[in-house]
Image (tube, rainbow, N blue to C red):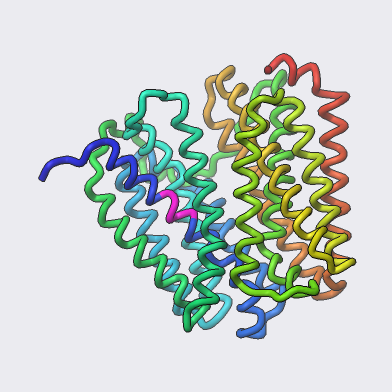
Amino acid sequence: MQTPSSSLQYMIISFALCLAAVSTALASPLYAIYEQVWGITTSQVGYIFIAYMLGVVFSLLFLSKLNAIYNYKQVIVVSLSLSIMGMILSACALSIWLLSFSRFLIGIASGLITTAAMVGLKDQYPFRNKMLSEKLTSMITILGFALGPLLGGILADHTHHPLADPYWIMAIFSGVVLFSVFLVQPKNQPEKKYKWSELLKVEGLILPQAASRKIFWICSISALCSFGAFSLYAALAGTFIRNLAIHSSATFTGFSISIILFVSVLSQLFCKSLKEMNVLSYGLVALLLGTISLVVAEIEHGMTFLFLSILLTGIGHGFSLSAAYYFIGKIIELEKNPLIFSSYLFIAYQGTIWPVIFSSYLIEYMGLIVTLWLISILLMATIIWLIYQIKFKVKPLLVCHK
């Protein structure tokens, strides 16, 4: 059989990465339906939401070396298989524990395929401009995360079984892509080999040298705030919207989540002409204002502040991550140590876990408004501290890294 061209193999890997991202975000607009149909509490919804991120963290800590033992094609096959298994279990789940376990499997798959697909896309990159490789990989991933909630909401509103059919449909599409992955022929094989016993060793945080450490922490905590603001909204959007004076649906919930990421992508394209130091500050300010707007939207039950919150959160998400990736990339390039990026991601991912855990519990005991106030005050205090650090403490260092 003739080997497909690099362009076709690149497209296959792109679809695999995109569908993996879709499967992780597919459940976001369904949480409100789970609450209504299953009669579960907000804290139990929190279990389901964070199960995915725990799977990602587990993959990052224990399974990242699989990419050094096997080639990216084999890892992608395993990842898609786990993702399909997770979606099938989600479709069949009748309890939060089975659903949480399925989300955990999907999280492991997501963590594995992110690195494997990045290597594969670079290996099969068919275009002349090699500088666009990482940017295209990022865009493919964000597109998948943006399409997930949108497709989940639309399928939930237009199928007979809203808590099962979306998973079955995406599992079928993923199955088709899984079979097509077998057509991919890796050009390069892993150079470094690990023993299986080494997989059980947990990698500690790899920090940069002292001269760059302040910048590293500023960027990592900025990304944590960015992920935290978005993940809190993504996990509890159904609850937020249900309390507003508007007609709520899974499609609207999914769209409200997806639009943040679409705005994030557009804002990253826009901020290319700005200085990265200013981009980081503007992004944090936008996150600050977006959080305030979300609280006002819940208090006043107004659509205007809700859309303003979505817009500002999307801009803040894009600006903050764009600048953080830039400076982290400069540090990695300077010190020739890519493990610094893994440490950065590990810190940033905490923003997707702890705000949701705390908010899920607090809502039951203190109500939605009080919970939003508490989480928002904590988030805003952290952002204000970051802005102060950037302006008065690390500005000379940021200029040096420009």
Considering every residue shown, the one lying at the far top of the view is: 400
Compared to residue 300, the image places residue 16 above or below, namely above
Considering every residue shown, the one lying at the far left of the view is: 1
Q: Residue at horizontal 47%, vertical 62%?
A: 105
Please identify the quadrant where the N terminus is shown.
top left
Most foreground residue, 301 or 109: 301
Taking the image as shown, residue 186 lies to the left or right of residue 162, namely: left
Taking the image as shown, residue 373 lies to the left or right of residue 322, namely: right
- Give the dominant element type of the magenta stretch: helix, strand or loop: helix
**x and y percentages locating residue 294 in the rendered image:** 81, 58
Taking the image as shown, residue 200 lies to the left or right of residue 381, namely: left
Q: Which residues are magenta?
A: 17-21
Residue 249 in sight from this viewpoint: yes
Please identify the quadrant where the C terminus is shown.
top right
Q: Residue at horizontal 42%, vertical 61%?
A: 83
- Magenta highlight on residue 351: no
